[in-house]
Image (cartoon, grey):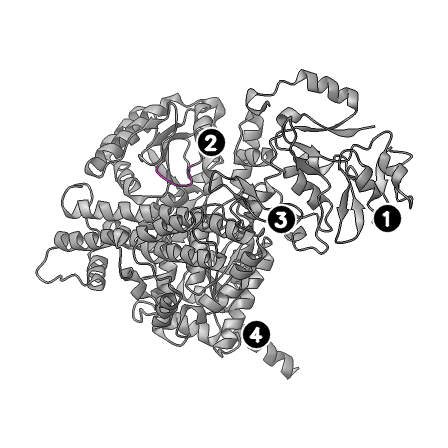
Amino acid sequence: MRKVYCDIRKCVSCRTCEIACAVRHSRSGDLYQALREEPRPKRLVRVDASEFGPFPLRCHHCEVAACIDACKTGATRRDPITGKVLIDRDKCVGCWMCVMVCPFGAVFPDMQTGKALKCDLCESHDQPACVASCPTRALFFEEFDEFEAEYKKRRPRSLVRR
Amino acid sequence: MAVNRKRTVDPAAEMILSCALEEGASTSWDRWEAMQPQCGFGKLGVCCRICNMGPCRIDPFGDGPQEGVCGANADTIAARNLVRMIASGASAHSDHGRDVAHTLLMAARGEAADFSIKDEVKLRALAAEYGVETAGKDTAKIAEEVATIAFSEFGQQHGELRFLKRAPEKRQKIWREQGVAPRGVDREVVQLMHVTHMGVDNDYKSIIKHGIRAALADGWGGSMIATDLSDVLFGSPVPIRSQVNFGVLDEKEVNIVVHGHEPTLSEMIVQASRDPELIELAKSKGANGITLAGICCTANEILMRHGIPIAGNFLSQELAILTGVVEAMIVDVQCVMPGLSELTKCYHTKLITTSPKCRFPGEVEHIEFDERHAMEAAKRIIRTAIENFPNRDKSRIRTVGPGMSTGLVAGFTAENAFHFLGGRYRATYRPLNNAIIEGRIRGLAGVVGCNNPNICQDFAHLEMTKELIKHDVLVVQTGCAAIACAKAGLLAPEGARFAGPGLQEVCEAVGIPPVLHLGSCVDNSRILVALCNVINEGGLGEDLSDIPVAGAAPEWMSEKAISIGFYVVASGIFTVFGTPHPVLGSKNLTDYICGDIENDFGARFAFEEDPIKAAHLMIDHINKKRADLKLRPMLSESVREEVLTAK
């Protein structure tokens, strides 16, 4: 399954992925119009700090997903075809169990709507918005093997190295 | 929405661009594409880099931080960033004005022997305005005193700029009440930079007022001085025919392109290019002669005064080099793309910088312009170009042919433009005012500004201008917008065929184009003066905000455009920008400049990317002002109504 991977050496915490994500998940799909939408478009990725430097925190669509096990309404489920972990907004009751059990903190409670939010890998698009927008090309949408090979090949400039 | 995703609507530019593709040359369009997507924080104006506690960014979607480290919110940050753009834009125009004042002063003192006073009438009018005693003084003495006073406007600390008096009294009163009447040019810019320093002003409305003060110091100060003193020094323009677009570059001649903004050096280059000795030299190198053409506002300055043809506008600058027939591109200041240097390395074209303010790194030739030895520098530049002629790579010539040029009429000014409406015997603004009052002309619009790769080149200018004249709005233009419309033939009297019935009638009766070229971007001050004349003529209200008039910058790119926008709005004129100012991250600030600012200054901004919709915002505004003045309905419309009722 293709997932989003990050070459953490190249993340400069510009948060472009956050804005691109929120715009992609808005009704209009346009930055200027999205700002005035209600409810406000939400980003499903968050740039966070770590001891290795900043990185975009987002759902990993785990093979063994704690959030699926914890979901009492069956809203959080794995898509049998794509393998993505998705939340059915109609079934979600906002109990935040998934928020609590996620080992990464990658499920976000949306207090405005009372629904849990997480990365859906931009369901209907070829490439997730975060990957397409990353100005330093730190993000990849690939199979893990592909990413691993690519990662080893790359030698980022010492400037962005941490 | 009328959006054109092509790179340009100019067929000549299109032809050269396709060659660029073949040759693998990169232009600003390619660099723009490589830059996508552009940073949303920057676009929304909510990234603050003012102090070292930052950089701070406000989350526009409300989840993340809503305040910077110092506590500044999106309103403060966006307002500070915006007015800093005004500071830069006002500085650019004003420094240009200062240089012209300096040259006039030197010319008056006989220190710049190559310059002389070309328009004594205007000099004396300025002297009267400045209160300079002229009796018994010779021209040089008057010029010296006028230049000294103009010069002192920049450093003036108290009182008000002298040209503010040109505005209607009501407008002056508004400026004083709002506390935005500029004291001096430099002072307002310095104060603006102080106000936006970390931990000073954080009330967005107050910050905007400081910005307006600096913007007014540009429009009614620096820019106006630049225009008026240029007229004195180089002569006031009179209507003049010329050609525009790449077809003006002649394959058989030495082609020299001047690019930038200031007229001082280019005036000398015009004279030097006619020097028989240099023409002889060009012939000895195998050329037929010397062709001079311009790009951007330097082009407009020498077009207005000498009818020198124009090669193109802002986005055409790189394309000029790609033609392979330009021996030298002479640049001074502003809107000169740093990318030119890389591009000229791949072609025989010599890039020559002339201003100590605008240098390129590396081996770009620098021939510094100095007022004392102006002609000498100009001749040296032309000689360098001629000597470069044999270096042309014949296999890479991409000329578009003389068919790719369009005729235009330029050279309109506040003094002459509307006098034509009255003819030689009634040279007043009365006929213009009457045409508006009677409903032949709906109103006036200024369509100005740049090019920007984020909009198809010239598309927005053309669509908007055509829509306006179709609805009988007389359009005045400056800068790259004027060049855009000139390329499409709107600046020729024949352009009247695109105009509505009322405007067409006026254009045909008087023999003017429906779109008037008023000059370079500092010459936006001519539009202000012209509108003041309309008020003084009477019948159309008492303040600039009463006249049926609107402004627009549909393809804006530079900080100067923001400064212009603000002095126009603060002068009471509704203004539409194509892509928005970088302020949308702050709802309060956006709502203020696009709304409540009208309560303070009688005008507001609007942002509309679709040029047709934007034109209709302007037309609606003009209609509203017509209704407020209780003017008669448009003649063409009332005729239609009569026919309908008769049926």
Q: Could you tell me if the residues under marks 4 and 1 are in contact, i.e. CB atoms within 8 Å?
A: no
Which secondary structure lies at badge 2?
helix
Residue at 16% across, 48% down: B108
What chain does mark 2 sit on? Answer: B
Could you tell me if residue B505 is visible in this image? no
Q: Nearer the viewer, residue A110 or B583?
A: A110
Residue B588, given in percent of the width and then of the height, sits at 56, 58
Is label 4 in contact with label 3 (beta carbons under 8 Å)? no
Task: Name the residue that disc number 1 marks.
Answer: A92
Tell which subunit mark 1 falls on.
Answer: A
Of circles 4 and 1, which is in front?
Answer: 1
The numbered mark at residue B637 is 4
For the magenta stretch, what is the residue range?
B332-336
Please state which of the two labelled residues, at mark 2 or mark 4, is closer to the viewer. Answer: 2
Q: Is residue B497 magenta?
A: no
Of all residues, the one furthest to the bottom in this rendering is B646
Mark 2 or mark 3: name the one nearer the start of the chain: 3
Residue A35: horizontal and vertical position, in percent?
65, 52
**Mark 1: few/some/many CA within 10 Å (<14, 14-19, 20+):** some
From the image, give the main secondary structure of the stretch colored magenta: loop
Q: Residues within 10 Å of mark 3 (few under 14, many from 20)?
A: many
Q: Which residue is mark 3?
A: B60
Q: Nearer the viewer, residue B535 or B307?
A: B535
Q: In percent of the image, x 31 and y 63: which residue is there?
A: B164
Q: CA distance from mark 4 to mark 3?
A: 46 Å
